[in-house]
């Protein structure tokens, strides 16, 4: 089947109205891409976040009357708010194959490979993590995740107790378990992430030492290493709690930070941790530190 692909750029406050209109015209799918350069995750409490200018793309039946549709769009959001407009035909193809082609093995330092089920891992890999892309964050391709994976490869957590806070797909916790951790506690507030982590732990046969909690409290001094690949605001709010989870001389790994957020995070965590210099990858950063002795 051939689809009509309609892309419209507009201010974020009109996206809900525009989506509702396109759904009433039986849009087969609706997706969003940035139309302005700012990051969308500065406010982690927001229910839904878009870019200030967002590109909305919908797939429509090619027999639709575009004159009527565009008249409705102009009436719904105002002509002045249509900042860009493109219409083209999209021929049907093997969507599953195209999706899979976009995800291949991710190799970290010739030691670790995160490998989707439809591909073969390179030969000679000591640590293989089997993981398919899904709804939960974490496939190894994003800089924030790869920074943490590189740290784990360089610092194998052998016989250590590890907390993966904001575990997403479970990729970091599973890797820690495969690299010799004694136990791993994954924590996430997203039910989809909890489900994904449990399933991925079973797929990688580490379910006997990877325990998943939803908004759980693992307890005081319950870990030797804590990894949190989340966002700046929750990292700032959770610093004291993270400190309580770690033993003296425990190690903390923080990611999900933009480079321009490093100083704020360092300023907060330096109260409890001896922090190392940040590690950067493109516009992203990772911070690590060692817990100071608890004061009596």
Image: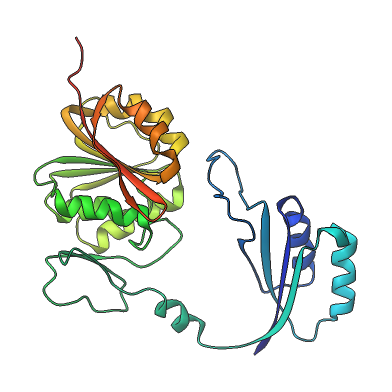
Q: Residue at x 16, y 67 (%)?
A: 110
User: Does residue 231 show up?
Assistant: no
Q: Nearer the viewer, residue 47 or 183?
A: 47
Residue 29 in view (yes/no): yes
Residue name at image x 26 percent, y 59 percent: 202
Task: Residue at 79% x, 86% y: name it.
Answer: 63
Task: Give percent across and percent down for residue 39.
Answer: 54, 50
Q: Quadrant of residue 215?
A: top left
Residue most toward the top?
Answer: 296
Left or right, 41 with reference to 148: right
The colour style of the image is rainbow
Q: Quadrant of the N terminus?
A: bottom right
Residue 31 to residue 102: above or below: above
Question: In the drawing, does residue 211 fall left or right of residue 166?
Answer: left
> Which image quadrant: the C terminus?
top left
* In-image side of 237 versus 155 (left or right): right
List x then y, in percent, for residue 30. 65, 67
Residue nearest the observer in this picture, 112 or 165 = 112
Residue 37: image location, x then y, percent: 58, 55
Q: Please, is residue 278 above or below residue 4 in the view?
A: above
Q: Position of residue 270 (x, y in %)?
A: 30, 26
Residue at image position (38%, 73%) is 103
User: Is 50 on the left or on the right of 222, as rendered?
Assistant: right
């Amino acid at each position: 089947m051939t689809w009509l692909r309609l892309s419209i750029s507009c201010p974020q406050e009109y996206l809900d109205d525009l989506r509702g209109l396109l759904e009433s015209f039986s849009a087969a799918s609706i997706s969003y891409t940035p139309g302005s350069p700012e990051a969308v995750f500065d406010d982690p409490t927001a229910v839904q976040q878009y870019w200030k200018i967002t590109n909305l793309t919908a797939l429509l039946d090619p027999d639709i009357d575009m004159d009527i549709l565009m008249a409705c769009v102009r009436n719904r959001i105002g002509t002045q708010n249509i900042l860009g407009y493109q219409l083209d035909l999209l021929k049907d193809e093997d969507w599953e194959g195209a999706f899979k082609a976009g995800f291949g093995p991710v190799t970290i330092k010739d030691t670790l490979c995160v490998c989707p089920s439809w591909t073969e891992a390179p030969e000679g890999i000591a640590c293989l993590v089997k993981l398919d892309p899904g709804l939960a964050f974490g496939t190894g391709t994003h800089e924030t995740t790869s920074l943490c994976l590189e740290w784990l490869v360089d610092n194998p957590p052998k016989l250590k107790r590890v907390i993966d806070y904001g575990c997403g797909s479970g990729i970091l916790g599973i890797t820690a378990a495969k690299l010799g951790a004694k136990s791993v506690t994954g924590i996430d507030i997203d039910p989809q992430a909890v489900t994904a982590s449990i399933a991925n732990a079973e797929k990688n046969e580490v379910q006997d030492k990877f325990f998943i909690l939803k908004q759980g409290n693992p307890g005081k001094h319950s870990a030797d290493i804590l990894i949190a690949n989340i966002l700046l605001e929750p990292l700032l709010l959770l610093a004291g709690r993270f400190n309580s989870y770690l033993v003296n001389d425990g190690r903390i790994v923080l990611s999900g930070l933009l480079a321009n957020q490093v100083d704020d995070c360092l300023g907060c965590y330096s109260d409890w941790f001896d922090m190392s210099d940040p590690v950067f990858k493109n516009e992203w950063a990772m911070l690590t530190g060692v817990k100071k002795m608890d004061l009596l």
